[in-house]
Each structure stands twice: as structure tokens, then as C-alpha cells.
Amino acid sequence: MKRPRSPRDRRRLLALWLAASAVIGGLALGVAFRSRTAPRSLSYGQFRKRLERGEISSARVGPSLIEGTLAAREPAGTPVPYRVSRVGMEHDEDLIRLLDAHVPDGHYEAEEPPSPVQAMVFPGAMFLMMIAALSLVITRSGGLGSALASVKTRPKRYAEGQAPVTFRDVAGHEEVVTELREIADFLRTPGKFGSLGGRPPKGVLLVGSPGTGKTLLARAVAGEAGVPFFSLCGSDFVELYVGVGASRVRKLFAKAQAMAPSLIFIDELDAIGKARGSGGPGGHDERDQTLNQLLVEMDGFDADRGIILLAATNRPETLDPALVRPGRFDRQVVVDRPDLISREQILKVHARSVPLDESINLKQVAAMTPGFVGADLANLVNEAALLAARRGKCSVGLPEFEEGIERLIAGPEKRQRLIRLAEKRRIAVHEAGHALVARCLPDTDPVHKVTIIGRGNGALGYTLYRPEEDRLLHTRTSLRNSISSLLGGTLAEEITLGEASDGCTSDLQRATQIARRMVSQFGMSPLLGRLNYGGDSDGPGSSVDSRWSEQTAREIDLEVRRIVDECQAAARHILETRRRALGRITDALIERETIDGPALDEILALGGRVGDE
């Protein structure tokens, strides 16, 4: 007795049967297709000759093509199809007469050519259909069709409960927080200021360097007030199509008024707020229209309804005067780089979720990061945490922070870089020259570390200084000593090895820049006096303001050269009088590759008091 087939077996048999049928059918179609005789292509002249000889058995005459079959030469033969192009012979008047005379039993048919109207309408209709189909495809794909929807404002909106950032998440900007807390109070209780006749500001402009926390402060205001927060970048308004940016501004303010009280934040305001007419005639129609609409909207909306505009920029000097006047941006708040105490507070905020070693002192870390902004400090904490995890530690200690600072300043270490022994010694001499000159001159930052290990920024070695405190002002003496320290490396190569190398490029650039600023900006030249010559000329080779003569420009160049030469002479004197100390530092660098500040002091102490020898 046979076992009945299961449904699975029946499905397999059915699939096999369908596959076999498909293969057989395909083979049959292929044989049939190959058995068909391809039409023979004839020229119009050959067709006329065959027609006159009676070799055409059938014909179908079209406006530009003739198709049919040739008469078989044998009674049982198969007719052969043919094809003839009539291009150039469309107006042959003898063709119909020849077909009547030579095609048997009138086996031919002629297609009437389309009328001129049909010839025009059909291609036009096809073209319109193609355009419509193309527009539909582009619109659904978000391409050019999105230009029709580009007038829509696309702000990032953080409603109540979606912007958890508050002033507790902001550190190091106590004065700025005090200014902005008043804005949050108004948004939360609009009647508080109206009872005393006060009017809240329509706009607040945050000015500061990149990374100082301007966007974070704006979100903190919205988080404290608990109101909808609309955030856009200045470049979001500007499009290729003129009028799109103005429409986006109108719709943005309409949305904010519909959800008042609310807060609007525009980052990088200088993208749309640059002074009109500064880029030449006719070059910025879209940006100018967007700015004009922004000015109108800021005049039109009533601050008493609870709408405040916050904006941020790091280039306030480029903004249009009509934008920053009272009545639009009533208040400008400067977000400075954090000082030592502020950096410590910022580090504490970013280190909340990072397990720190018990012995670490964040104030010590903050002292090692002069000039760092909030974004740099956040990145530093992250780098230190990654380094601790890479080393298998359970907490982040001071070595990880020190390594993180060096990675941010100079890039990662390049220990696997192959350096010849002669070049290694030259690098050690160069860095020893920097360290020795800086150590011997007063009013300079203490040397924290000297190394000949290359870094990712292309440096083959570097000398790291650690300021003991934040310095806001620099005297002529401190600036000249900084130039001498920068020139100490190349001078040490000349004194020890007989000639310098091309590894002093960045040192010469920085030294020349400091000297030029001393002359052209700081008025520290006895010859040129207390004048500012082209305040933006702070780089080597930069030109002075066109208001000054060529003679003045030459005198500036000569003064820059004089200052650099005098600083070079001071550095050379130190290196020649303390040549033995230079050799000891060089040998220590070759042996250890890295020496810190205390080790440097110990090496110098072997030769007696600093300045002797």
C-alpha cells in the first residue's frame, strides 16, 4: 500500500512540473523564434527593380517604410519577408502605378500619411505627457519638485518637556546666565515686567567665539521658561530661489505667534544678516530680501505677546546696522572664553557621568587648558574617558587628562614613525633650545613638557608650556621673550650642528606674527609711535591699511626685522653661554624621548643656578 503524498511533496512536484514546462516552453519558443526568417533589407532602387520583374508578392506601403514578402522562386518555396526604407522617396508618384501593374491580385495596401494637424498634435501631446511624468517622479523623489515645498519653514522645534537643558547644565558663564535668566522669567511670567512699565527686549544677540556655548545657552533659556523653542541656522533661510528665504521668515514668525509665548533661536546670524550692499550690486538679492523680511518681522511682532528672538554669531562686525539697532536686537550679550575658575566648573559639568580617580584635581586640569572653550573641554573629558577605557582602567586619572590635552593640541602620538639617528638628534637639539631659552628668560610660561615624539599635526617634537594663571595682558618684555623662545630651536641647531633645518617654519611664522602685531597694532615701536597701522595686519607678509604710505609700510617692515633680530641675539647669547646645559637636555631627550618640567629643572640644576654657566 502506497503512502499518501504529503502537501509538501505535492508542492515540490508541482514546482518541478512548472519548471519543466517553463524550460520546454522556452526551448519551443526559442526554436520557433530562430526558425523565423529575418526580413531582408532592400534599398528603394532594388525594390523598384524587383517590382518591375514581378518578384514582389505583397506589399504594405507606409509613409516611410514598405514591408511585404518576395515571390517564391519555387512552387513549394517559402516567401521571404523584406523591408524597404522610403526616406527621401516619400513623393514617388509612380509607385502606386507600378504596384497596380506588378503585384498580383492587388496584394498591397497603402497607409495614408497623417495630416499636418495630427503630425503636430501627437508629438506635442507625447512631450507634455513626458514632462508631466518627469515632474511626478522628481516630486516624489524629493528633487527639483521639492522647490515647490521649499518655502515651508523647517525649524527644529523643542516643545515643553522635549528641551531638558536648563541653567544647571550651563557652567562658567555666571554673568551671561544672569542676563538670560531675565528673559526666561519674562517668558514664564509676562506680566511681571509690565506692571512696572518695563518692556522686555525683542531680541538678544549672543556674541562669542565658536564653541563657547551660545546654542546651549539658548536651549537653557527655553528649558527654564518651559516654552516652545524654534531653532534654525542662518543658512536655512537662504536658497537658490529668490523669495524663498523671506517666505520662510514669515512662516517662522507666524508659527511662533500661534504658539506664544515661544522662543526663536537663529544660529550663525551673519549668514543672512550681513550688511546690505557689501558684496557688490545685484549679487545677493535673495539674502537681502530675507534680511529685509526679518527686519520687518522684528518690527511687526509685539514682544508683550511673549515672543523673543535669540541669535548667535561670532562675527558681529559684519552685521547690518539696521539689524542690531535698539528696537530689534535690544541687548547684546558677550559669551567670552572661560577663565580658570569657569573652566573648572565646565569640567565638573561634563565629568558628571565619568568616574574620576579620587586623587584627581580638576582645578589642576583646568590650569593646563588656557584658551579652551566649552566644546574643547567637553571633547577633553571624552578623550580622557576613551584613553582610560583603552588602558583598561576603571576610572579616569590625571595622566589620561594630560594625554588628552596633548592629543587636542598636537594630535595623537606617532611612535612608529621611523627617524634616522641624525635627525633624532637634530630634533632633540631643536626642542632643547626652545626649553632652555624659555627657562632662562623671565616673564615666560613655565615649561611643562619637552618631547621628541612626533604628533599627528606633523610636528616631529614639541615643547609644551603650562601657564600658572590666565594672562589677559602682555607686556613688551613678555612678547619679546616669547619671540626669543620661538627662535631658540633654530639657533640651537646652528650653534650645535652648524646649520639649521626646515623644521623651524611654524616657529618663524609665529615669531614674525608677534613682532608685526607689536609694531602695527600695539604701538610698541619707538620709531613709529603709539599708532595702529591696519589693525588686521597680524600675519607675516600682510599689508598695512591703504591709508598709510609706502614709506610707512617699509618702516613697519624694518621695525619688525629689528625686533626679531634683537630677540634672536638674546636667544643666541643664552644658548652660547649655557651650551653645556643645552647638551645635557639634548642627551636626556635622546635617552628618554620625553622629559617633564621637574626633570628639566633637575638637569639645569646640575650646572648651577639658572643663568650661570
Image (cartoon, rainbow, N blue to C red):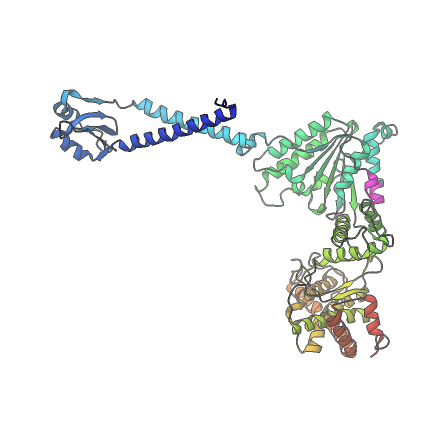
Given residues 321 and 410, the one toward you in this image is 410
Given residues 329 and 63, the one toward you in this image is 63
Quarter assignment of residue 469 = bottom right
In the picture, measured across the screen, residue 19 lies left or right of residue 579, that is left
User: Is 174 inside the magenta-drawn segment?
Assistant: yes
In the picture, measured across the screen, residue 176 lies left or right of residue 293, that is right
Given residues 180 and 381, the one toward you in this image is 381
Q: Position of residue 360 (x, y in %)?
A: 85, 54
Quarter assignment of residue 70 = top left
* Residue 565 vertical position relative to residue 162 in the rendered view, above or below: below
Q: Is any part of residue 199 visible from this angle? A: no
Given residues 411 and 518, the one toward you in this image is 411
User: Is 22 inside the magenta-drawn segment?
Assistant: no
In the picture, measured across the screen, residue 431 lies left or right of residue 341, that is left
Q: Is any part of residue 582 visible from this angle? A: yes
Q: Position of residue 364 (x, y in %)?
A: 85, 56
* Residue 497 vertical position relative to residue 208 in the rendered view, above or below: below
Q: Position of residue 154 (x, y in %)?
A: 65, 32
Looking at the rendered image, the quarter that the C terminus falls into is: bottom right
Query: The magenta stretch spans which residues?
Result: 164-177
Q: Position of residue 5 (x, y in %)?
A: 49, 23
* Residue 216 vertical position relative to residue 107 in the rendered view, above or below: below
Question: Farthest front residue?
Answer: 1
Count of numbered circles on the image: 0
Quarter assignment of residue 517 = bottom right
Question: Farthest top residue?
Answer: 105
